[in-house]
Amino acid sequence: MASLTSVAKAAATITKNPFLIKIFSPAAKIFTSYSGYRQMGLKLDDILIEETPVMQKAISRLPASESYARNYRILTAHQLSLSHHVLSAAKSVKPEEDDAYLTPYILQAEFEAQEKEELDNAVFQKA
Amino acid sequence: MFSKRFLSTSVAKAKITQLANGLTVATKSVPSSTSTIGLYSAAGSRAENPYNSGVSTLLGSVLAKSAYSSSLASGVIVSSSNSKETTGVTFSFANGALSDALSVFEKTLSTKAVESTFSDAELIKSEAEKAASFSESLEEKPIERVLEHLTSTAFQSTSLALPTYGKAETVGTLEPMDLTSFFGKYFINSNLALVGTGDVDHEKLIEFASKLTFASGVKPVTKPAKFLGSEVRLRDDTLPSAYVAIAAKGESVLSPNYYVAKVAAKVNGSYSTASPFYKLQGGKLADLVSEYHLADTFSHFSTSYSDTGLWGFVTKSSNIDNLDDLIHFTLKDWGRLSTSISEAEIERAKSALKVELLGTEVTPLEASDKLASDALVSGFEASAAEIVSRIDKVTTSDVTKWAQATLYDQDIAVSGTGQIEALFDYNRIRNDMSMMRW
Amino acid sequence: MLSKVSSRSFSSSALARASAPIKITSAPLAVSPAVSSLKVIVNGAGSKSGPAGLAHLTSTFSFLDTQSKSALRLKRESEFLGGAYKSYVTRDAIVLDATFLKEDLPYFVTALGSVLTESTYKPHELSEIVLPAVKATYNAAVSSASFIALEELHALSFRKGLGSPLYFDGTKSYSVEDISAFAKSAFTADAVEIVSSNVTESDLQSFIADSAFSSLPASGLASSAKPATFVGAESRIRSAGPTAAAIGLPIEDASTYALLSAYLTSEIESTLSTQISTSIKTYKDASLFYFVAESSSSAEVAAAIKKAAAALKSAKGLAKFAKLAQFQTGLTGGKDTVSVSKFNYVAVGDIDALPFADEL
């Protein structure tokens, strides 16, 4: 899986370039609406694979209120899935509500893991 | 470029002189507002036998006690110190009060004073009781307990196996005659060192030493100690954790591999969850232990005696169910020393060793114990520059070669107390000293 | 100054800028000549300042992530260089202590400067590193009855300030913002004092001028007024484990009380079962004389404390303990007699067996 760090980097490249924004932004909107997670009451950061050490660390560092809200959204999605329903347009997550609340924590955890990997395998060089 | 500067500025070098009568005089300047002088014999618990175990401790404490109260007002603190291979009576004082200390020394250790002290049966009896309960109190401290029993099982049936501060059941029964005969045998010029640390003039101490009238004689010989792979378990489920020490036969003080073994012990070094930085420290073992909470503390050591040593580790773990994992992965990691240790790990270990050996502040009293042991056991104390250069010379392949000969598939001594239900039997642990594959 | 030719070459501008207001003193070589040490003492950042426990938390945040370097990288790099560092809190100050091979001086000057100026105080560090560590320190400390007794003695003698607990005891909850604000107000150039050992002073000055130390803000640190002191109070803390009793009082005449503590040392000896400790705690703006006895036998503690209290009420012939006092505290002089009618008294542990203050 590509690290979120590389995704963030690619996103930065795109948002800096007006031409690329013109292509990617509408495509992303269509992609997001078809993927349908917002109708399940979820944010994008809720559906990232969480069974990795990095994600576990990131999730453990969420403030209590964010963590509660995340769990509540996931429960809602499970309930919807069980009852074969989706939320009405009024109740589904609005684009402006779909914030990257977890992303900074993932980026920090990925940075730490990558730095540790590098330092664990430091090579000694004679000065 | 900077390493050369160590040589020119090494001021704190010990001076060691042997007088014509065999008495050793050693001094070292230690920056402090206090100083210490001490008389040490190269006879500690190792010079005892199972029937007079504790006599060296008792001898030191009786002599110290005989002068303690009367010399307090003159600002001289009399105390005693014991190790496996030394016994000392020390006199600590504020800098400049050397003459006070010397006069207390005379009052305590002149032939007449020693004779009268040893004839004081009451003093000896009360000190013997104290020594016995001190010995018992050490058994209450789990880490001290496993380490003492580790040495005891590793060198069983030799005098090195006797506990440093004596066995409670023998020390309590010792009599004046035991002290007199121990003193007569081991407090002879060839076996003694007069040590001064802090602000003590070497020439002055030599002048004082030349007036001392201890008996002369040939330095007593210590029987060599033999290492035996073995184990001792003192399971005690009332303790909160498991405490285990494991060691292979290590290096002696004068071994050419002394620093190699020390460096090897620093590769995994020590670990304590009480430190704020324990999750950050380098080392594969520390990483694993913190990731899976395998232990609360561990500490690798390379302990050296005059003719042998112990190389291993001691650990405390409240995760008693996973004790087997802790032991397995620790010994596996020792295996890496023989096979795949990296140069970076060795360099880190060398740096850590330098800072530990050279960067620890010591009081004159502590410096005195160390200087005495160096003067009596090896005849010299390595200067900072010598230590740095000897550590610098240790290479990765030195460590590998040493580990292949000393650790790989070698017998170990195991000692455990506390909740050691999950400490595997000897053969399972012994099997981790080698690998089916490299 | 000019005659001291450093073995390194520096740009003259670096030397010119070395006029930082930071106080630098050099201590005698305490360790081997191959090793140097630096102590950065931040006066006024100790546990007597700020809300209870905050200084201890701030101190434990030292050497964690900074803007320029992560805690992990600092730790791993200093392991390779051969350096050890720690931070601890006293009542007066936060002390950053680094011991390292002599040639690594610039690295550690930079690291110590960064701790004071650009620590990032991240929330996850508080919960993952700092809180467990302060809890371990606190729990280890309070396992000693004498420690509890001495803490209480400070509380009785000074109430606020020096009377605040030394360590964070978990009764309050602080956010990283609280910690960061405390650090920002306390870590100022005039509060910082550097004690070096085995360091070429001109090297150190230029490294400091080039480091983050030079960007420490100067602040009008209020010169601390003499704290109010209190005597005649008693406190009894019932707890399991060993028993301890302490008496003490805030003092001015340290020399005389050094004699008294030397006298008590020789009058009331530590035994295998009872540990006696008596001395003077010297702080920037006050001193506290104390005597504390601890034992698993409460009867022995009671006997020792009665003896000590009697001595405190009328001790004569102290002058002959001048040499012992000098050995213990380095202090000379002092009066031959002491007579104290009011002092503070703390009983900890099995307090049923310990006397009350008015029975002493």
Image (cartoon, coloured by chain):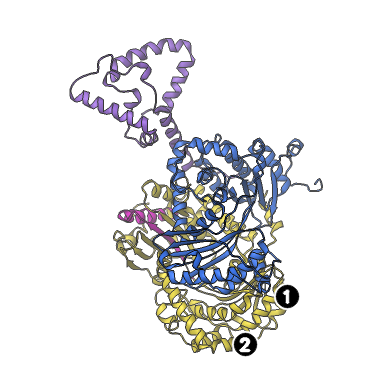
Chain colours: A purple, B yellow, C blue
Determine if residue C76 is in view. no
Residue that numbered label 1 is attached to: B204
Residue at 45% over, 56% down: C142
Question: What secondary structure is marked by label 1?
Answer: helix
Q: Residue furthest right?
A: C3
| Majority SS type along the magenta span | helix
- Give the magenta part as a residue range: B308-337
Q: Report the amino acid beneath label 1.
A: Lys
Q: What is the chain letter for disc 1?
A: B
Q: Report the amino acid beneath label 2.
A: Thr
B268 to A62, vertically: above or below: below
Q: How many marks?
A: 2
B54 to A117, vertically: above or below: below
Q: Nearer the viewer, residue C333 or A81?
A: C333
Residue A119's tag is none
Q: Residue C60: image x %, image y %?
A: 51, 45
Q: Residue A39: image x %, image y %?
A: 27, 18
Categorize mark 2 by other alpha carbons within 10 Å: few (<14), some (14-19), many (20+): some
Residue B111's tag is 2
Both labels 2 and 1 in a single chain: yes
